[in-house]
Image: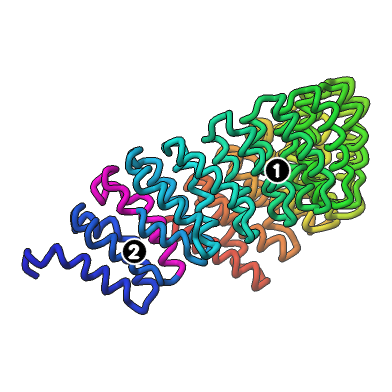
């Protein structure tokens, strides 16, 4: 192709690919827009590429989404901020399409472009765009308009600012719930750009309209705005305007609204100050903790520690703790799980005496919960309680419950506790672990259920990783070696499994001196299942030990097993020998 035609080539390819029936080609073309723009140069990008994209907006949603994303970072390719306004027409078109994710991406890109535009361009180009979207006949344009007011407002002249506030008020009262929802979602961002004189008047009247909306989906989005508005207002204004709304919302007929209040309430405490929190918000929060909808109780329970941090300990003990006790025996396992995930954080807030008197019984009841997530949430946060009441008291109060669970008649309960043991060990330290839990870990290796024995072997490996090979050499290895003489072949199989897991952690020296002899002894076992498992373990030890040990000890053992009468033993022994040969060759 000649050099004079080359600049035309990229745009020709783009146009061809954008009109191609294959959506993947059209997508690839859009994702290469920046490359094409660089090839065309800034002027031709402005005069040819951008107008072409503005016209080509009836494509598949996936292509439009990619286009909206690309245009948000396109300012450098059109000649910098002085020409940024050329990007507004295609983005305006994209922000009116029916597909929500395309509109949202287009609004995001409009905001990104708008924040970089010069003030004069914002007044000349961006403000008219906002007004056009807000007056759009189709609701999609009005929804998108709500998301760009906060970009346009700061640079608008005073007369236009008044008009923009008036337009936003109309959007808050729009006939379409989707528009009112968008207005509620973006009210906090818009309010942050507005002068304080107009906050109490215009913004609060918009807020009042939204909080009294007939649609619960609008009201619950207004709740989200409460915390944002509360931070913008003075405390006394917050008490006058926001507090009554939140108290009403905490008793709203829609559980979704109450759910949002439960999530946001603790943020408002900081905005209104301590006295209104005590008189108004604590009773509202107690109502939410006792709500008849489980979802609301879950949200409220999940925030209990954050809420208590804002209150003084006396208030928390007097008002919140009775509700916490009720929630610990709630009929919904998800409520109990949400409570268990945060309740340990209450210990530092309430102090040692209150924790011992009030919280420990609740911890114990949750630790014995039938639902595994509840137990895990308690065990995984024990260190927070340890810091407050000390290891001695913790071991006297909670450890018996853990031991009881470790010996539970339901094997799934025992399995759950085994899985938490390394976590407990890391939190409580090696000394405590040796005294209280060490014997339990060995006991599980001889459990009647295979899953427990297997988990116990994995548990020993994780403990060896946590406390180090020296500790394992002293506390685990001798007892494991002793158990290889167990009369039951299934227990002997578990020991072989444990050896194969421990060897990589313990290293070559201990494996050769302590673990390998155990495996070689087991190769003389009378049970074929043990012998072919020996072959598997020996194969797993090949990479860990020195080559000389492989030749002197492992290979002779495997050769002997390869001549065994049992076909499975011979098969696995030959596989292991093959593995040795492969290592030698490599």
The quarter of the image holding the C terminus is bottom left
Seen from the viewer's position, the closer of residues 287 and 465 is 287
Q: Which mark is residue 54?
A: 2
Q: Residues within 10 Å of mark 1 (few under 14, many from 20)?
A: some
Q: Is residue 443 visible?
A: no
Q: Is residue 71 magenta?
A: yes
Residue 15's place in the image compared with 291, above or below, is below
Q: Main secondary structure of the magenta part?
A: helix
Q: Tell me where residue 114 appears, x and y as whole percent.
A: 39, 44
Secondary structure beneath dot 1 equals helix
Secondary structure beneath dot 2 equals helix
**In this picture, which residue range is highlighted in magenta?**
61-87
Q: Is residue 235 left or right of residue 539?
A: right
Q: Nearer the viewer, mark 2 or mark 1?
A: 1
Residue depicted at x 64% and y 29%: 233
Seen from the viewer's position, the closer of residues 577 and 227 is 227
Q: Is residue 75 magenta?
A: yes
Q: If you read the primary sequence from the N terminus, does the residue marked by circle 2 or circle 1 appear first?
A: 2
Q: Tell me where residue 387 appears, x and y as whole percent.
A: 76, 23
Report the residue that reaches farthest toward the bottom. 21
Seen from the viewer's position, the closer of residues 463 and 568 is 463
Q: Which of the 4 image quadrants contains residue 89?
A: bottom left
Q: Cα distance, mark 2 to mark 1? A: 39 Å
Residue depicted at x 44% and y 62%: 65
Q: How many marks?
A: 2
Q: Which of the 4 image quadrants contains residue 508?
A: top right
The residue indicated by pointer 1 is 208
Q: Which mark is residue 365?
A: none
Q: Tell me where residue 79 appears, x and y as whole percent.
A: 23, 47
Q: Residues within 10 Å of mark 2 (few under 14, many from 20)?
A: some
Q: Is residue 452 visible?
A: yes
Residue 398's place in the image compared with 207, above or below, is above
């Amino acid at each position: 192709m000649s050099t004079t035609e080359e600049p035309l080539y990229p745009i020709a390819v783009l146009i061809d690919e954008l009109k191609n029936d294959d959506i993947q080609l059209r997508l690839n073309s859009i994702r290469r827009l920046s490359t094409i723009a660089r090839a065309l140069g800034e002027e031709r990008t402005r005069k040819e590429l951008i107008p072409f994209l503005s016209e080509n907006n009836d494509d598949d949603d996936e292509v439009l989404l990619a286009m909206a994303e690309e245009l948000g970072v396109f300012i450098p390719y059109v000649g910098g901020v002085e020409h940024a306004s050329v990007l507004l027409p295609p983005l305006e078109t994209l922000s009116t399409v029916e597909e929500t994710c395309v509109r949202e991406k287009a609004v995001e890109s409009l905001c990104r472009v708008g924040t970089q535009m010069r003030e004069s361009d914002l007044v000349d180009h961006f403000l008219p765009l906002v007004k056009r979207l807000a007056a759009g006949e189709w609701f999609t344009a009005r929804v998108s308009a709500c998301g760009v007011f906060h970009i346009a407002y700061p640079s608008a002249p005073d007369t236009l600012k008044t008009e923009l506030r008036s337009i936003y008020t109309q959007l808050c009262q729009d006939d379409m719930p989707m528009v009112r929802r968008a207005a509620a979602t973006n009210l906090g961002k818009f309010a942050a750009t507005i002068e304080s004189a107009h906050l109490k008047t215009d913004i609060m009247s918009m807020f009042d309209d939204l909080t009294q909306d007939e649609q619960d989906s609008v009201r619950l989005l207004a709740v989200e705005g409460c915390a944002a508005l509360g931070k913008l207002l003075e405390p006394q204004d917050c008490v006058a305007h926001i507090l009554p709304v939140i108290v009403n919302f905490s008793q709203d007929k829609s559980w979704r609204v109450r759910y949002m209040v439960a999530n946001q309430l603790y943020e408002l405490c900081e905005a209104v100050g301590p006295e209104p929190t005590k008189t108004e918000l604590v009773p509202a929060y107690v109502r939410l903790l006792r709500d008849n909808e489980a979802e609301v109780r879950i949200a409220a329970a999940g925030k209990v520690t954050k809420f208590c941090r804002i209150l003084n300990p006396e208030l928390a003990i007097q008002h919140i703790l009775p509700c916490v006790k009720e929630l610990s025996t709630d009929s919904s396992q998800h409520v109990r799980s949400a409570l268990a995930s945060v309740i340990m954080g209450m210990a530092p807030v309430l102090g040692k005496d209150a924790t011992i008197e009030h919280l420990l019984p609740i911890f114990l009841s949750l630790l014995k919960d039938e639902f595994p997530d509840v137990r895990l949430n308690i065990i995984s946060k024990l260190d927070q309680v340890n810091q407050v009441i000390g290891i001695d008291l913790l071991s006297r109060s909670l450890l018996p419950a853990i031991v009881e669970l470790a010996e539970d008649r339901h094997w799934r309960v025992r399995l759950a506790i085994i899985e938490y043991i390394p976590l407990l060990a890391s939190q409580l330290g090696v000394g405590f672990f040796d005294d209280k839990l060490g014997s339990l870990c060995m006991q599980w290796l001889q459990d009647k259920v295979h899953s427990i024995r297997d988990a116990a072997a994995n548990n020993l490996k994780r403990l060896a990783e946590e406390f180090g090979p020296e500790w394992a050499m002293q506390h685990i290895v001798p007892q494991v070696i002793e158990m290889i003489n167990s009369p039951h072949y299934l227990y002997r199989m578990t020991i072989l499994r444990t050896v194969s897991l421990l060897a990589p952690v313990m290293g070559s020296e201990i494996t050769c001196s302590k673990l390998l002899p155990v495996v070689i002894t087991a190769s003389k076992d009378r049970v074929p299942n043990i012998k072919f498992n020996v072959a598997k373990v020996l194969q797993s030890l090949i990479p860990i030990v020195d080559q000389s040990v492989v030749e002197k000890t492992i290979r002779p053992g495997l050769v002997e097993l390869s001549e065994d009468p049992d076909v499975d033993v011979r098969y696995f022994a030959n596989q292991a020998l093959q593995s040795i040969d492969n290592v030698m060759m490599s």
